[in-house]
Amino acid sequence: MNFKGKNVIVTGAAKGIGRAIVLGYARLGANVVAIDILEKELEKTVRDASEYNTKIKGICISVSDEEAIRKAVRDSVEEFEQIHVLVNNAGIYPGNNFITQKTEEWKRIIDINILGTMYPTQEILPHMIENGYGRIINLGSVAGEYGLDAFVDYSMTKGAVISFTKALSKLVGDKGITVNCVSPGTINTISENTLLDERTTLKRFGTPDELANAVMFLSSDEASYITGQNLLVDGGRRST
Ligand SMILES: NC(=O)c1ccc[n+]([C@@H]2O[C@H](COP(=O)([O-])OP(=O)(O)OC[C@H]3O[C@@H](n4cnc5c(N)ncnc54)[C@H](O)[C@@H]3O)[C@@H](O)[C@H]2O)c1
């Protein structure tokens, strides 16, 4: 895969899977706009990705701030002229007991995981349509595919992201734009250690780089005939 001359926007870019995605694109030659709320961590990701000698720009805002995220997308288009790839990775997964949960908690997770995916997507679409080219990758989850009882609200938001991906891919398929979802199983974003996970066929957690590889593939020119898919990157998870 080669992303030389390609410009990419990644949300939730400061740490975890998003950081691996930013570093992965930079390594393969892309310029990246990295969006996150964590200022210090974002600065570090931008600094580290810049070592690959492409242009990396950090923007510290929340994807749930509609005005700010739409402006960030517009500014990126103006600065880079063409945005080829949008990766909607920002997401939260606090874990809660649905039966006793407060409405405010639902609103927060819906704002970030669902609306925070829809705002930048809607803002970039006219630009991608004009160019006749675009790759949109959304981060789903095994929770959205199977449902996890300790993450009921989260499962709902990720189910929405998966359906959004499928529906949108049909809307823009004849405009040169592909829309796909990558759904992680359990990824160890905390340490470098390989943690065991008996729920999976591979008997271990995944790494952020293993996720980033799937995201990059689906957004590459090599994946030109793949759209509307939800790719589970879960080590062959067999139970919840
Ligand atoms: N790690 C896993 O096992 C796993 C499993 C399934 C799905 N996912 C999904 O993958 C994505 C990345 O997860 P992760 O494990 O790397 O999480 P993480 O918490 O390690 O990193 C998420 C990043 O998103 C940023 N973020 C959170 N809210 C934001 C907001 N409102 N605006 C902008 N940025 C925001 C955080 O600051 C952080 O940098 C999420 O969408 C998550 O739901 C992760």
Image (cartoon, rainbow, N blue to C red):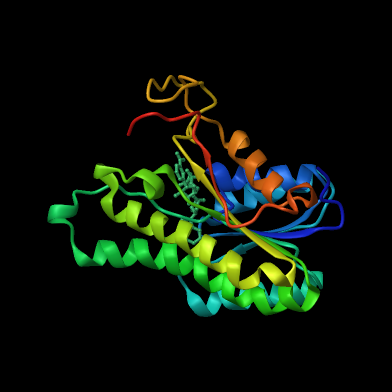
Extreme left residue here? Answer: 100
Q: Is residue 96 rendered to the left or right of residue 123?
A: left
In the picture, measured across the screen, residue 9 lies left or right of residue 182, that is right
Q: Position of residue 40 (x, y in %)?
A: 56, 52
Quadrant of the frame with the N terminus: top right
Q: Residue at x 75, y 63 (%)?
A: 84
Total residue callouts: 0
Query: Does 53 sit above or below residue 39?
Result: above
Q: Position of residue 59 (x, y in %)?
A: 62, 64
Q: State the image coordinates of residue 82 (x, y, percent, origin top left).
A: 79, 70
Quadrant of image for the C terminus: top left
Using the rendered image of the protein, determine whether residue 48 is visible from the camera's viewpoint: no
Q: Nearer the viewer, residue 141 or 190?
A: 141
Q: Position of residue 150 (x, y in %)?
A: 25, 43
Tell me: residue 141, above or below residue 10: above
Query: Which residue is rendered at x = 74% and y = 47% of the image?
Result: 25
Q: What residue is at 39 percent from the left and 68 percent from the top? A: 111
Residue 81 found in image quarter: bottom right
Residue depicted at 43% across the width and 25% down the height: 200
60, above or below 224, in the image: below
Answer whether residue 143 is visible to the viewer in this image: yes
